[in-house]
Each structure stands twice: as C-alpha cells, then as structure tokens.
Amino acid sequence: MIKGYPHLRLCIFALLFISNQLVAQNATRKTSFAQKDIMRSAVFLQNNQMVNDFNGSKILYFSRHDNVNAFFTAKGIIYKVNKIDQKELARRKRELKEKEKEKKKENESDEESLPLRTTTLTMQWLGANPNPKIEAIDKQEGYYSFLKKDNGAIKTLTTEGFKSITYKELYPGIDVVYSFSEKGGMEYYLVVRPHADVSKVKMAWTNAKSIKKDGNGNLLVHTGSGDIMESAPVSYTGNIKVASDFKIKNNVVQFDFPQGYSENEVLTIDPWVSVLTSLPPLNLGLDVDYDFFGNLFVYGAGAIDESDLTDFFEVTKYNSSGTPLWTFNGTVPAISWTTADLTDAIVVPGNFIVDKVSGKTYIGKTDLQGSSAVRINSAGAYDNFVSSINPFFQETWGFAYKCSDGSVLALGGGTSSELNMGIINTTTGATTTTNITGITSSYYQDILAGTYDTAGNLYVIMNSSSAPLPY
C-alpha cells in the first residue's frame, strides 16, 4: 500500500521503532520536566569579543535576562535600560494611517522594529580592589552563538554561560556574588567575613536622573528609559536576621545597620535587582517541535537590545530529560543569512519545523528580497542547505512536513503578489511557489499555519487584508 512512498515508509518505521523503545523505557520510569527559562537567558555569558569595551573598561561577562542588560567589568556594572519610545510609536501610527489613504507602492512594507529609547548608566565600586579575582561558577550545558560585524564582514562567535559570578576580595574580607533570582531579575549578595569593614562598600551611580528609596526601603534608580530597582537588603549573621537598610548620599549608596551586628560572625547582605520598563519579557516561546528520539526543540525570542544583531530569533534543543543541548541564534554568516535587519530591507523571523526522523531543523525568515529557509543538523550546525528565493514570495510564517515525499512546505505570503506557499525540495533546495486559493485580486493572502492529515490532505489557516478571505 505504501510501496511507492519511501519517505512515508521511513517515517512509519522510525515512529514504530522509537515508540516501542519509549514504551519499554516508560515501563520502568516516567520522565517529565519543567523549564521556565526556555531560551536559557538566565546566565552570565563570558565575553568572547561579543561586546565591545566601554569607556576603556573591559567587559568580562554580560547578561540579558528579564530585561536586565548588565555588563560586568572589574570595577562594577554597566546597565543598559531600554524603553519603547511612545512618542515615536504614535508618530509611526499616524504616518501609517496617512499611507493607508494612498495606494501602496510595490514592495512597500509597514513593518519596523520597535522604537527604543536607551539609557546607559554605570554602578562602580568606590575604593575597591581594582583587579579582583572574578570566578564564574556552575557552567551550563551547551553553548551560545552570536553574530557580529567585523570590518564589513559577519562572523559567528560562541561562548559559555554560567549561573553565577563572584568578585573575590572586592574589599578586604568581602566577596560579592551575582546570580539569578527565582523572584525575577538578578540577585547579588555580599559575604562579609568577621571583622571586615562593611562601611568601605560604596556603590557610585552615574547617569541616573535620581536615586531614592520607596516606602518599602527599596532602592529606585530612575532613568529616562525606566527604573532599576534593588530590593531592600535582607541581612543575616548565621540564622539571626539583622536590621539593614540603604543609605544614599550624592548618588553613592552604602549599607546601613542601625542596630549594629556581631562582627565576630559572617554577615550576609542579600538584595536583588530588577529593571522596570515597558518592554515585553524575554524568553518568549513562539513554537515547539520534536523528533522521534524524544528531543524537544523550542523556537522563540532572544534578547531585546539595540546592539544585539541576532534580533528576536533563537532555537534551543533539549533532550527528553530537559537537559539543554545547544542554542542556535538564527544566523549563518557563511551565506549572509540572518533574521537580523542588517540592511535596509525588512528582515524578521518566520518560523521553524523539525524533521522527525533526522532531527534536522528548517528555519525560515521574512525578507522583502525573498523569503528563504536554512537547515541545521541535529547538532545545531548549518548543513549547507538553503532554499531558493522567489522575490514575490517574501514571508514565511509556518512550515508543514509531508512524510509521503519528504518535502517541506513554507507557508506565508507577500506584499506584492498573491503567492502564499512554497514547496521546498529537501535535496536540492529548489522552491516551487504557488497560490493555493486561485484568487488573484491583490488581497495580500497569507497562510499562517498548516498541517497534514494521514490521507495527505493539507489544512491551513489563512489571513487577508480584505474580502473575500475571512480571517
């Protein structure tokens, strides 16, 4: 019955074989896991030339989690606080309404990146050890890749992530440890060994509009792009809680202990940091897929930072136990393929799909020059496959995989034609584009998602700017 469909036979064989294996495994154990940090952003990344030095200070580590863009130097921290510029956004909306009154030009697009207002401010440890030993602890599984311009060329850099970093002997007898809090944001605590002088600890802020405490004793560092909040410190000697507070003078912050504490014991001071802005959170999971070996693939948002050329696109692979294996940031410099807006053309992420048998992943992008898809292998590396381009098929919002012939469908549309689907040959990369509705009256038809049933019928959800297609 399936004699003429080798791909279908392979799919069915793999599914039956691996299903039997999973049944055998589940007879002895059940595996489940939960992962809140789906794009693995709650880490401190070692700076391997991804981030340039700032005002002569070398960036050693950096983090971009829960909108906390923090860059660590030997002397302190540089924060970048981003906020959506509401005035610019309103101006764009007014301009868009004016455009809608006129006939749109060929290839015109209204898609733009969010208008951001960015404030850069620094927190420096005054009078501290100028060269403290900085230790990165608890290295995470897998690796991280980044795109960077270098004299007009584009290169890929990789690095590792750590769960915490420690400044050893930042002040005599005093260490500072940074990690990520379950409450959200970044946590740091000071370890003050017996008889160390905690009054020497001074945090000087620059480029802040104001620094003050709220009614709960939290420290608010106000900027034009949003506030950085440090929670009121909670301090202990052993199991005994010690009354503590922030003390502010001329934008310099210290820790105050109105009732004193036992200097014969180790003192722990524990605030945590969050950035309060109007930006959406990171770790936006947009889609998931799997292979027949039980691995999970997550497609979603990466960092939001005006200097980050990786834009919003990432794919992370987990094994069946929830262990992250790799993160791919959606860039292939060898062929100048990326979801970042590196030129004047609008380039934004599309979607992805996983070949269940091979574990290879197809990733698409939207590009006014023509949409295309690349393929990465099961190890997260580009395997020299890219689909051909039709300049009139510009948007890829989803994919569908057809077991009967091994083809991949790119589902989307365009701004200058009625094309809404591309059939990708997974051997040659040749893409055959088509209009499945047969309607040719410039209704900007987009396929948003699709799937096959076992009989080979394709079902899709479509969208159009006007009649006769419904939403």
Image (cartoon, rainbow, N blue to C red):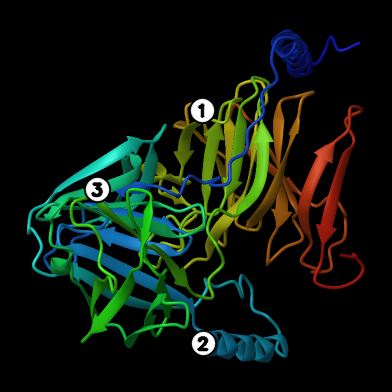
Q: Secondary structure at mark 2?
A: helix
As measured in the structure, the alpha-carbon distance from the residue carrying label 2 to the one carrying label 1 is 41 Å
Question: What is the x, y in percent for residue 397?
Answer: 68, 53
Q: Secondary structure at mark 1?
A: loop
In the image, what residue type sits under mark 3? Thr
Q: Name the quadrant of the N terminus.
A: top right
In the image, what residue type sits under mark 2? Glu
Q: In the figure, 158 relative to 462: above or below?
A: above
Determine which of the numbered discs, if any, sits on residue 166 in the image.
3
Residue toward you, 257 or 414: 257
Q: Residue at x 18, y 63 (%)?
A: 198
Determine which of the numbered discs, if any, sits on residue 377 in the image.
1
10 Å neighbourhood of mark 3: few (<14), some, or many (≥20)? Answer: many
Q: Name the quadrant of the C terminus.
A: bottom right
Q: Nearer the viewer, mark 3 or mark 1?
A: 3
Q: In the figure, 29 relative to 119: above or below?
A: above
Taking the image as shown, residue 19 lies to the left or right of residue 47, namely: right
State which tag comes first along the sequence, 3 or 2: 2
Q: Nearer the viewer, mark 3 or mark 2?
A: 3
Determine which of the numbered discs, if any, sits on residue 88 in the image.
2
State which tag comes first along the sequence, 3 or 1: 3
As measured in the structure, the alpha-carbon distance from the residue carrying label 3 to the one carrying label 1 is 36 Å
As measured in the structure, the alpha-carbon distance from the residue carrying label 3 to the one carrying label 2 is 40 Å
In the image, what residue type sits under mark 1? Asn
